Image (cartoon, rainbow, N blue to C red):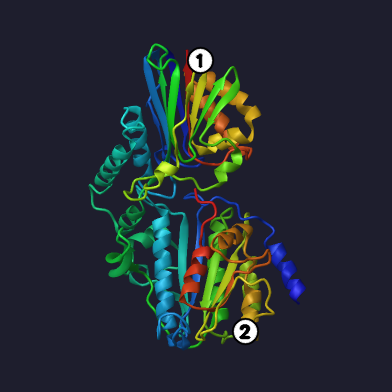
Amino acid sequence: MHVRARPYWLPKGGNPSEDYEDAYWPEGQVDREVGRFRCAVADGAAETSFSRLWAQMLVCAWGRGHLGRRHFHTKIPELQRQWLAEVTARPLPWYAEEKLRSGAFAALVGLHIADGRQANGNAWHALAVGDACLFQFREGELITSCPLTQADQFGIRPWLLSSNGGQDDEVVDYYHMPSGRWRTGDTFYLMTDALACWYLTAPADGTDLDIVTARDDPRAAATFSAWICSLRDSGGLRNDDITLLRVDVG
Amino acid sequence: MASLTVEVQEKENRTVYRAEISRGSPSCFLFLIDQSGSMDDPFGGGEEGRKKSDGVADAINRLLQNLVIKCAKSEGVRDYFHVGVLGYGSTVGPAFGGSLAGRELVPISLIADHPARVEERTKKVDDGAGGLVDQTVKFPVWFDPAARGATPMCQVLKQATAILESWLAQHPSCFPPIVINITDGESTDGNPTQVASELRGLSSQDGNSLFFNVHLSSSRSDPIEFPDGGSALPDEYAQLLFHLSSALPEYMRKVAQQEGYQVTDGARGFVFNADMVSVIRFLDIGTRPSNLR
């Protein structure tokens, strides 16, 4: 199968790019024939510290195939230990030590797409925890929305993956592992919550999303940034870090 | 008089307190702490014999600690807030200790880095097996208890107004300042109605300053929290403090409701007969940021 994937991201309006706390995988564009493809976006919770590191660790683990259904409960504690080792590698001031006690939190959505020549045909499966979302479009129509399907679901405090051991005992009740089939020409979007909420609030405007992200030129990122800024200015989009990964399969 | 007050409150709260709080557009908290001689009396409820001055100092230090932690990110503490503490008793003025002594409004990152001292205290934490164990935690201290002299509330309100006028001139579009007055007694330098009105009248483009009052108690009766009328309050002085207090903005009413309070649209930022627990809960609700970026 041929995969074209391109990440788009933007920090909160008014913030420098160093403050961006989402993460995505793969780190750059993809445009090639592959047998399998893994991608993910994660949203580090703004109220916590070192959440970007946690978000990055989660997308990398998914992208490298270490966080699948079978490995989830063994890999998460390993990632938690790595996170703690990394953030405590240097002395911390009293407030950072106190804040570490509550850990970092992140929403994650990861997608795995398999070529039709593989055993399961043109199949995909995903992992979703929290309010980062996966959308699948076919011929311009939304056919999959996961884990959230309506804009009003974003008001509820989502269950997020914690970097602290012992806070994820109930995660099995809150993660989603949807699966499905893809056809040539399908488009998948992985989004962090603000943009996903905007889309589910005004799905008719999804055409704009398609037009803006379908560009394949050096100015695509700038066009996306300008479009996001205009949505924020109009009040239609909450001012939050934005991450979008567009994946076209053929 | 009551209806006029309500009209004034509605006019004062005509905006919706939606401004983002960011490093480029910080907000501020100013605490006014009664340090008169009677603050050495014990609280009515809670820990037996605990002085009100000690309890309030602990509550303010804990609040400052929580604000610092809330603003702490991987790279350090972000200056979402500037914070001041004014004491009023035998003297009136800034009440930070240590290297921040004499400072009026201080960026939260400076507060983080300059406690007067850091104590070690123990707290009970879940041991993960159904029991509790002692854990040593660091407890930074910026503000020490004091209790001497009278209650010059008008003077401290004038000083707070001057500080906020200057702040608002520099931050005209900020989320409006929040002033929390903690007192156990009657003003001894006159009726504070006019100067409190001037304080509440200060505004940014996002709305008027918010002025909340905590009335501390030496009695054992239950506190009255976020009332929407003064008639249930037992004395003239409590009624006066109620009328001085701003109505809670909508976002703060929602926070109070989430914390289990029955608050109505007309609820004021006022607690009467506050014990230590209600002081801490009030400070938590009164300083919960609505729109941190």
Side (left or right) of A219 relative to B268: left
Q: Nearer the viewer, residue A44 or B157?
A: A44
Residue under numbered circle 1:
A183
Disc number at residue B237? 2
* Classed neighbour count for the residue bearing mark 2: other residues with Cα under 10 Å, few (<14), some (14–19), many (≥20): some
Q: Residue at x 53, y 70 (%)?
A: B180
Q: Position of residue B55 (x, y in %)?
A: 42, 77
What quarter of the picture does the N terminus of chain B occupy? bottom right
Helix, strand or loop at disc 1?
loop
Q: Position of residue A25 (x, y in %)?
A: 38, 28
Q: What amino acid is at disc 2? A: Tyr
Is label 2 in contact with label 1 (beta carbons under 8 Å)? no
Q: Position of residue A190 (x, y in %)?
A: 48, 29
Q: Nearer the viewer, residue A44 or B125?
A: B125
Q: How many marks?
A: 2
Q: Position of residue A24 (x, y in %)?
A: 40, 31
